[in-house]
Amino acid sequence: NLPDVDQAIADIAAHVSAAVDLLRRGIALPGPDAREDWNDFALALPAAPAVYFQTKQAAFGRAFGDFARIWSVR
């Protein structure tokens, strides 16, 4: 059960709005689940995804900006 359903809906709306803003600016980057084995889009990743994500992590963080904190919201 959610303690405050209205607040949860408002939070989700804010997250969706922030995601739409990124997409409208042409920023479509992989989230944390892109590294998972079950990711159907893993085929599009470089042959060494661990090295790729380690190399690109800082750049992804800069591109996502404040939106990156959404991955830790519960």
Image: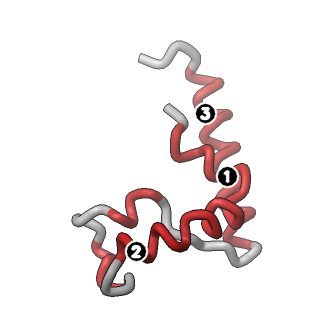
Local SS, label 1: helix
What's the mark number on residue 51? 2
In the picture, the quarter occupied by the N terminus is: top left
Residue 13 x/y as whole percent = 66, 43
Above/below status of 1 relative to 39 = above
Disc 1 + disc 3, Cβ < 8 Å: no
Local SS, label 3: helix
Residue 54 x/y as whole percent = 47, 67
Amino acid type at mark 3: Ile
Q: Which of 4 and 61 is in front in this view?
A: 61
Residue 47 x/y as whole percent = 31, 86
The answer to whether 56 appears left or right of 11 in the picture is: left
Label 1, on which residue?
67
What's the mark number on residue 9? 3
Dot 3 or dot 2, earlier in sequence: 3
Alpha carbon distance from label 3 to label 2: 37 Å
Front of the two marks 3 and 2: 2
Local SS, label 2: helix
Above/below status of 58 relative to 17 = below
Residue at the extreme left of the image, as rendered: 38
Q: Write the residue at 70% across / 53% down.
A: 17
**Way the structure is coloured:** secondary structure
Dot 1 or dot 2, earlier in sequence: 2
Label 1: few (<14), some (14–19) or many (≥20) C-alpha neighbours in 10 Å: some
Q: Write the residue at 23% across / 65% down.
A: 38
